[in-house]
Structures are given as C-alpha cells and as structure tokens.
Image (tube, rainbow, N blue to C red):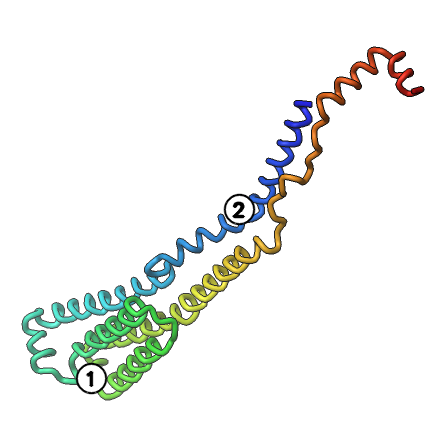
Amino acid sequence: MDSRCSSSADSRLTGRGMGSITTTPISTRVEPYEAGEKKCISDVRRTFCLFVTFDLLFITLLWIIELNANGGIPTQLDKEVLHYDYRASFFDIFLLAVFRFATLILAYAVCKLRHWWAIAITTAVSCAFLIVKVILSKLLSQGAFGYLLPIISFVLAWIETWLLDFKVLPQEAEDENRYQSFVDAAERAPLMGPGPLSDGQFYSPPESVADSDEDLDDKHDPEKGLIQQVS
C-alpha cells in the first residue's frame, strides 16, 4: 500500500513538473533579448558612431598636417581661418567634418533616430559643397593635400551613408522583429501548452486496510475462502 501511495504521489509531482517545463525554454530565450532592449545603444549603432568620430578626427589630423607642412600652424591658421578664402583654404573642409559629426551624433546617438533623413542631409550637403569647391577653388594647385582632403572627405561621407542604410537600420529592425516574435511566443505558450496536471489525475485510491487483511487471510486459508464463496 505504501508503494502504491508513493507511486501515485510521484506521478502527481511528475505531472506538475511537466506543466512547468513547457514555458521554461521560451522564457530563457526571451531573456537575452530583454537584456538587449535595455541597452542604451546597439552594437552596430555604436560602431557607426565610432566611425563618425573617426571621420572628424581623421580630417582634423590631415588638416593639421597640411597647416604644418605649408609654413607652420600659427601662420597657416592666420591665413586660412582669420583671412579665410574659399578658393585656397582647407578650413571649410574641416568645418564640414564638424557639421557631419555634430548632426549624426545628435541624430543617431543622442536622439536614437531610426530613419535615414539625417544621413541623407549630411551626405547631400557634403557632396554638393565638395564638388563646388573643387570646381571653383585652387586646391588642386596646392599639392597633394589639394587632392587628398576633398577626396577623403567625400569617401567618408558615403561610407557613413552605406553603414547606416545597409547595416545599422536593417540589423536593428531584424533584432526588434526577432525579439517581438519571442515575446509573442512566450505570451501564447501558457494558452497553447498543456497546463499543470491536477491532483486527481494518475491517482488510484489506496485499498483499505480491512480489505487487504481479508485478502491475506483468504490466501493463507483457502478452506475459509471456499466456505465464504459457498455461503
């Protein structure tokens, strides 16, 4: 009798365990995405912001090298900044890099935009300004930097556009859709999966002590059992 009671209790515990197991895999798969949603900024967006910072620092470095190579930094700063000339100064290319950096960091790091309009504005302004400057200015007659700074600035602006349009926005949209699908699956799981088993399932009531004693007496005394059957 004790073995039957223990087996029935084990079956009830097993049934309850089966009901709780159904939701565990989905919840564990949702937890990493919940942690990702709590991040301030995604990894791919952080990479884009780092590249925008690299754009500014690289153009600044090239401009400082150009200032130092053409007669010294103080002299060239006075010539290109204080006495600015659109046809001969590289200072506006540096300001263009500052404009790209400020606009893109404000839009995609601070405001966390998920649209391409900010990068479209910076790329369009950069391309138009550089094309007009190369046509009207005398930069090409000032040595290697007259070619280097406009070309590098133009290329970096388009690389930023490619990163955002083909990497950042699609990857974030895919991650959000995947996270939402797991959340929906986790919400539907308690309704679709089998619920916890009740105490009455897989349970056979134990036999009474009196009945079991009579069965034992009948087995040991077959004559008594025969007499009871006859009567």
Residue 49, above or below 116: above
Quick one: SS at disc 2? helix
The residue under the point 26% across, 83% down is 129
Q: For mark 1, what is the residue?
A: 138
The residue under the point 36% across, 78% down is 117
State the quadrant of the N terminus. top right
Residue 217, above or below 69: above
Out of 113 and 142, give the one closest to the viewer: 113
The residue under the point 78% across, 18% down is 214
Q: Is residue 196 left or right of residue 142?
A: right
Q: Position of residue 227 (x, y in %)?
A: 91, 16
Residue 227, above or below 81: above
Q: Is residue 120 left or right of residue 68?
A: right
Of the two numbered discs 1 and 2 in the rendering, the one whose residue sits closer to the viewer: 2
Quick one: SS at disc 1? loop
Kindly identify which numbered label has been placed on residue 24: 2
Out of 19 and 137, give the one closest to the viewer: 19
Q: Position of residue 212 (x, y in %)?
A: 75, 20
Out of 114 and 74, give the one closest to the viewer: 114
Q: Is residue 67 left or right of residue 178?
A: left
